[in-house]
């Protein structure tokens, strides 16, 4: 799937609705993860913010999720996997001294 199609798909109302719910679910999972999880503090800070306004965060995550080939026809598990793949990056986690945003 090319960039234009990914862009268009990520802006449909149905994609954003699904993403909003998937983000809330994943935020709850992060809040309940083991405190020993790497960079737990940053991950939980993002999760707390997502739970306060999942619709706003769906707007911020939409490109990161769409770039993984996820569409509104994808499974819930595909959304969860895609969110998990980018969560730490959106949380601003540092990898080898470089800030990932």
Image: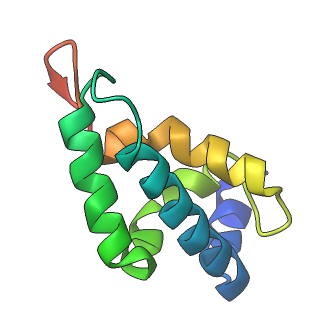
Q: How is the image coloured?
A: rainbow
- Residue at (61%, 49%) from the top-left corner? 67
Residue 96 in the image: x percent, y percent?
21, 12
Residue 14 visible, this angle: yes
* Position above or below: 79 against 52: above
Residue 92 visible, this angle: no
- Residue at (41%, 44%) from the top-left corner? 30
* Position above or below: 49 against 36: below
Judged left or right of residue 95, residue 10 is right
Residue that protrudes farthest toward the left in the picture: 97
In the image shown, does 19 or 62 lie closer to the viewer?
19
* Position above or below: 37 against 20: above
In the image shown, does 80 or 64 lie closer to the viewer?
80
- Residue at (72%, 82%) from the top-left corner? 14
Judged left or right of residue 14, residue 82 is left
Residue that protrudes farthest toward the top in the picture: 96
Residue that protrudes farthest toward the bottom in the picture: 13
Residue 25 in the image: x percent, y percent?
55, 60
Judged left or right of residue 62, residue 101 is left
Q: How many marks?
A: 0
């Amino acid at each position: 799937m090319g960039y234009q199609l990914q862009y268009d798909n990520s802006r449909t109302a149905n994609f954003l609705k699904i993403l909003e719910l998937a983000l809330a679910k994943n935020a709850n999972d992060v809040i309940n993860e083991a405190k020993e999880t790497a960079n737990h503090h940053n991950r939980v800070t993002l999760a707390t913010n997502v739970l306060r306004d999942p619709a706003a965060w769906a707007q911020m995550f939409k490109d990161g999720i769409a770039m993984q080939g996820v569409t509104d026809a994808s499974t819930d598990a595909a959304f969860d996997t895609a969110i998990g793949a980018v969560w730490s990056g959106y949380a601003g986690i540092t990898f080898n001294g470089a800030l990932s945003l």
